[in-house]
Image: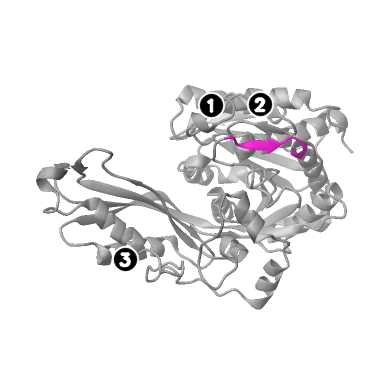
Amino acid sequence: MLEFASDDTRYLEELAEYVAIPSVSRNATDDTMRRAARWLVNQLSFAGAHLVETDGYPVVVGEWMGAKGAPTVLIYGHYDVQPPGDLDEWLSDPFTLTREGEIVRGRGVTDDKGPVYLVLKVAQAFLAQEGCLPINVKFLFEGEEEIGSPHLPSFVVEHADALATDLVISADGAMWRPDEPSLSVGSKGLVSMDIEVEGASDDLHSGRFGGVVPNPIHALGEIIAGLHHGDGSVAVAGFYDGVGELDADRRRQIAAVAFDEARFLDSLGLASGFGEAGYSLLERLWERPTLEVNGVRAGGKYTVIPHVAVANISCRLVPGQDPNAVVAAIQTHCNRLVPPGVTVRLKVDGARIPAYTIAADHPSIVAARAALEMVYPGQQVLLAKIAGTLPPVTLFEEYLGAKTLFFSFSTADEKLHAPNEYLRIRRLREGMRAWEQLWRLLARGEYLGDPGERQATRGG
């Protein structure tokens, strides 16, 4: 077994350097994003890492291919982070890694800088202590995941030969709960858009024109209210096209998961839940598609009738749904609901991502379960699904012919995308040990097959 540092000090000091770079892809300067990318390049010096330019932020790539006859894996992660949001809600500076007991807090520490960092330490430990890695490893770290990876498709298409792999392993994602090891066997797809309602050509004085002109906010409210039935189901005709019913076996599997719904809701400050009737909370979370209103903007606290009102909408999709068909259905639905005197437009964001699945008996899942059982002896490894979306995974399957294994040591409750994002310090060591065991297991032919057989496992 590899030996890792005897205490956490060095790891946390290095991780603090990385977190201190405010690599917010939505609004950071190009220089800031490049500083984060170059930090990774320095950590990956053993892999000949370098930056590859895109029409957006650069991609960090590198490879170590010295394990003759062993399988090749592509490690995916991202160096960009979400904006910090309201600074008044943070307990400490978001870009200063702050230790509080058994956690460290900072923007990006669990999504995705900490999970990526621990993979780097495993690779470095193998080379320092054993002189080699047990498998061939390629690295791909992008800087635009938090804005939908808009330039990754063209990069992957252009560099598909160089990225060829037997398996992609994502350091992004999250385990379901901190006290239960888990693997994800799927993630939801995504389409997002703005519903824009326009009335008059300009904002109007509410005293002079109130009651005699249509108010876009009122119209938008009617449209939003019409997106769901009273029982929580989506009211858009055609939204559920292609969605299969949950079979009895899957329902039994989900029902067997130890889950306290009341405690879950209480942790969110809620007395009761909401959602599509006929399904449990976990069934809705893992298996059912959703349509959510993420924001509304128009006018303000002044006496005006705004001429435009906008709602931000996102849909999380499940297997069987066509993202383009969902967009078309919402457009038709909005056109049907629009009141007289206003116009409605749908402005659809670029990413249209289908849902992703990997079979529970895929060789990488089998190996990953075995690795986690070594690190968490006596604990059952739960097979869950990611309710969020990871844009690259369907891209890798389409253009590299390789499945993606989610193997992140982030946890879903660590305030990803919210103020006071944090990482449990113990997850660094647990993650390092699990990645070590996973790589050792994958080096054995029983998981990804002998060299001549590996092509057959790609995309399986």
Extreme residue in the bottom direction: 248
Q: Position of residue 37 (x, y in %)?
A: 57, 28
Residue 445 position within the rendered picture, expressed as x and y whole percent measured from the top left = 82, 54
Q: Is residue 299 above or below residue 284?
A: above
Left or right of 6: which side holds 117? left
Which residue is found at the position 72% from the left and 47% from the top? 178
Q: Name the front one of labels 2 and 1.
A: 2
Q: The disc labelled 2 sits on which kind of residue? A: Thr
Whichever of labels 3 and 2 marks the residue nearer the N terminus, that label is 2
Separation of disc 2 and disc 1 at Cα? 15 Å
Question: Which comes sooner in the sequence, label 2 or label 1?
Answer: 1
Could you say where residue 145 lies in the image, as x and y percent from the top left? Answer: 52, 41
Whichever of labels 3 and 1 marks the residue nearer the N terminus, that label is 1
Q: Is residue 54 magenta?
A: no
Q: Secondary structure at mark 3?
A: helix
Please indicate whether residue 296 sits to the left or right of residue 152 in the image: left
For the point 28% across and 38% down, which residue is it?
A: 301
Q: Alpha carbon of mark 3 to alpha carbon of mark 2: how far?
A: 48 Å
- Amino acid at dot 1: Pro
* Residue at which label 1 appears: 22
One can see residue 231 in this view:
yes
The colour scheme applied to this rendered structure is one colour
Q: Where is mark 2, residue-wise? A: 98
Residue receiving disc 3: 333
Which stretch is magenta? 420-427
